[in-house]
Amino acid sequence: NILFGWFWPDLFTVIPWHYFAGFNSVSFVRLLRLVRLVRLVRIVKLAGRWQSRIGVSGAVIDTWRCIIATLVMLHWLSCLWGYLALSGHLHGHHTWYSDYVLSLQWDKMAFTAQEVYISAMYFCAATLTGVGFGDIAPKNISEISLCTCTIFWTGFMWAGVVGIIVNV
């Protein structure tokens, strides 16, 4: 029955309580929204049921979990690297992408966000796997800082992926 499930917590979390007198407290609204997080427990239970019904082994699920987590991390790191390249280009700074475009002899002024993202994904994947070809490198202090974080994040991620795959 819908009235005895998650209908009421969902309803109370979408009501704009700050417009009503006496409910100006941000902590009250956050507390109501926190109640919705309990639903995540149901998702974990549901995933366990699906796994047993479909008959997929835990090894396959762990492998897919590693693949998805790696791709998500590479996507976010690529977005950060792309942001640095595009914002640096707009402000006239020398960035990793401007140097990379010059090395490839492309037209520096005509690059698209998609080209920047693909180049950033290439750099992050090369950093993740430890190959590090050296054709893309940080050129200013913010890029060096992000590169250091990228190396640590991808190193820990890759160690986790290798550990899970070895246990499969």
Image (tube, rainbow, N blue to C red):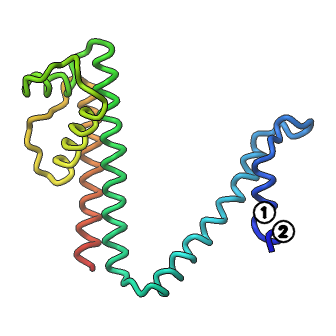
Q: Nearer the viewer, residue 166 or 54?
A: 54
Q: Disc 1 marks which amino acid?
A: Phe
* Residue 99 quadrant: top left
Distance in Å between CA atoms under marks 1 and 2: 6 Å
Label disc, if present, on residue 71 of the rendered structure: none
Q: Quadrant of the C terminus?
A: bottom left
Q: Nearer the viewer, residue 151 or 4?
A: 4
The answer to whether 74 is drawn above or below residue 159 in the figure is above
Give the residue at x 31% y 30%: 113
Give the residue at x 82% y 71%: 4
Q: Disc 2 marks which amino acid?
A: Leu
Asked if residue 10 lies left or right of residue 59, the reply is right
Give the residue at x 89% y 37%: 20
Give the residue at x 14% y 52%: 130
* Residue 158 quadrant: bottom left
* Element at label 1: helix
Residue 144 appears at what percent x and percent y?
A: 23, 31
Q: Quadrant of the N terminus?
A: bottom right
Q: Are marks 1 and 2 in contact (CB under 8 Å)?
A: yes
- Reading the image, the residue beneath label 1 is 7
- Reading the image, the residue beneath label 2 is 3
